[in-house]
Amino acid sequence: VEVEARSLPMELGEKGGVQNNGFVQNEDFEDKETSTSSQEEIPKPCRVDVEPVAVEEPVLKPYAGMPKEVLLQFSSQARYRVTREILFWLVIAGAVVLVCATIAIIALSPKCLDWWQASPIYQIYPRSFRDSNMDGNGDLKGIQEKLDHITYLNIKTVWITSFFKSPLKDLGYGAEDFYDIDPIFGSMTDFENLVAAIHDKGLKVIMDLIPNHTSDKHRWFQLSRNRTGKYTDYYIWQDCRQAAGSVIPPNNWVSVFGNSSWQFDEVRKQCYFHQFGKEQPDLNFRNPAVQQEIRDIIKFWLGKGVDGFSFGAVKFLLEATHLRDEPPVNKSQNGVNITAYSQLYHDYTTTQVGLHDIIRSFRHTMNEFSREPGRYRFMGSDDDEKEDIEATMLYYGTTFIQEADFPFNFNLINMKNLSGNSVFEAVNSWMKNMPAGKWPNWAVGSPNAARISTRIGKEYINVMNMLLLTLPGTPVTYYGEEIGMENIASENVSEQYVNSGPVVATLPEKSPMQWDGEVNAGFTEGNSSWLPVNSDYQSVNVEIQSSWSNSTLGLYRALTLLRNNELAMNRGWMCHIWKDSDVFVYVRELDGLDRVFMMVLNFGQESSTDLQAIVPNLPSEAVVRLSTHFSNAGKVVNTKLIKTEMGEGLVLEYKTAKPVHTMEAFQGKCFVAEKACYSMALNLLYTNC
């Protein structure tokens, strides 16, 4: 074996080739070999002639999770670079398209309805809503206890009438302190808790502010009558002549409540001016300090979280400085005999030059609190011009200068008689005179007008509510109208109010809210209430009507749901298509929607109406969506013959490709406030119709 092992390297060495130095023997081992085998020949190094063979490198392919070094080997290859660039530009193009589409949608989309447009307003007279402490007077805690009733009605705005500290001589409208709550209603803490509770439920709150006058108990008046500092001219003072032991006023001006609007003050020895009761002296709004006082009051209550104001009696803020006699309505009447407000034209005591500048200053102050998103502060003006609709419209302001969001509309309350024609005139008068782009509103009850059931009859309560809640704009409901409350009898008014002057005439419509059939209608748990409860409270109350599907309350809720849920009802066109002595008919529709709602409301006697003869291309059938006769809901009716009974109202629904507002025959009979169109494909509203 050893010989063979030795011979192999020798043979390899002889052949020659590449020397293999891959193995080097240990020197110690070589020395040992030499010493033990000195006689043997040391073998020559072994060389091997090896043919070089190319080693094939593995092909590297992209794989998930490859490191950066590997990724870079592929990124420069053409096929990957082109793909990457295509994807990059697709992403850029997609982003540009998305941005452009967003801008286009924003530009074309109509302004969302604000909170004061989107919901009916529920007006509360706080002394009559709910008594929480058993003293017989409604209060702020009582309102808080009943907020669930507001949400039950699908209403999101509460309007609380005056609750300032006051002698209550005029039922609270002459403030003794604009910065405090009258103890009869609670405390400032109660108010703050009420506002917090209202907002927690997602509701808004509006309060009354009558800046025209104060109570004669107000600190300002006490300082003014004593000629103290800046307060000397806070009120309107004039010298009065004395004759035969009586005071002769400076002119023939008469107060709203009758008799002279000048009252002699024994302290100052002058007469002060009052547009209303003698206990309510008018502030001097020609004094800049007075205007600033009112703006400070506005800021105070907005700071408390109030969402808006209804400014009342604003047309009385200024009087002519020349003090001329106002012209009599009957020129032949002896001036000495003029004692009633209606006997004069009030050219010098209402709507004077400069009035709207003051109102705009109120608006400017409120706008300072409207900058926070979602906290727009509403401003309404509660001034009923009655015969002068154009003067009322001035409170909207102009296209560039805003005043009130809307002046409250009492056309439906002021109707002298009820008929289809009179309702049409009340509606049309407002809509055709309202400035373009402004928002309408409607009311059928108020603290200063007899309730619907008393004013026009029980049989019309449901159809009036149907009218209120299906017209375009913001409806205002006075508490209790949702259940059909009536005035209490005048003879039932407590004797303590009989000598309160003209304000006693408005007491019957301020009777306590009827919550249930228990004693005092659930208004108070005390022994008595400040005004007697109506004798019908056991059948007309919230609790019992909540359990009836065919009640006035049930219909009211169904109407508010319809208004809130149907685009055509809350911001669409309104076109009046027919009127006569009995019936008023109009439609609500929206561009892009093929569904139309037609209201057929009877304010007279039993009637039959051929709607097909009135509206071209009207479908032969329509579905009764809602009816004051509840059993009719869901029925299909023939539009050629629509029968309605006295006080009956129908909300008909039908589909058409030809809306009424596009028909030439109805041009000039259609109105829209916040114009919008509906895209069924995109399910969104847009303005470029």
Image (cartoon, rainbow, N blue to C red):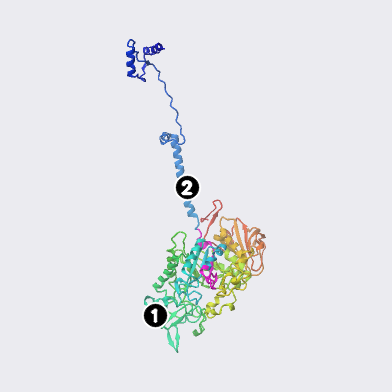
Q: Earlier in the sequence, mark 1 or mark 2?
A: 2
Q: Which residue is mark 2?
A: 97
Decide: few, some or many residues near mark 1? Use Cα within 10 Å; few <14, some 14-19, many ≥20. Answer: few
Which mark is on residue 226?
Answer: 1
Residue 21 vertical placement versus 644 (above, below): above
Relative depth, front residue between 387 and 658: 387
Relative depth, front residue between 69 and 191: 191
Q: Nearer the viewer, mark 1 or mark 2?
A: 1
Secondary-structure class at tag 2? helix
Instruction: Find residue 361 and report its image quarter.
Output: bottom left
Relative depth, front residue between 364 and 279: 279
Badge 1 amino acid: Asn
Q: CA distance from mark 1 to mark 2?
A: 73 Å
Please state the horizontal and vertical placement of residue 486, each as a whole percent of the image: 60, 72
Residue segment shown in magenta: 112-141
Residue 536 vertical placement versus 10 (above, below): below
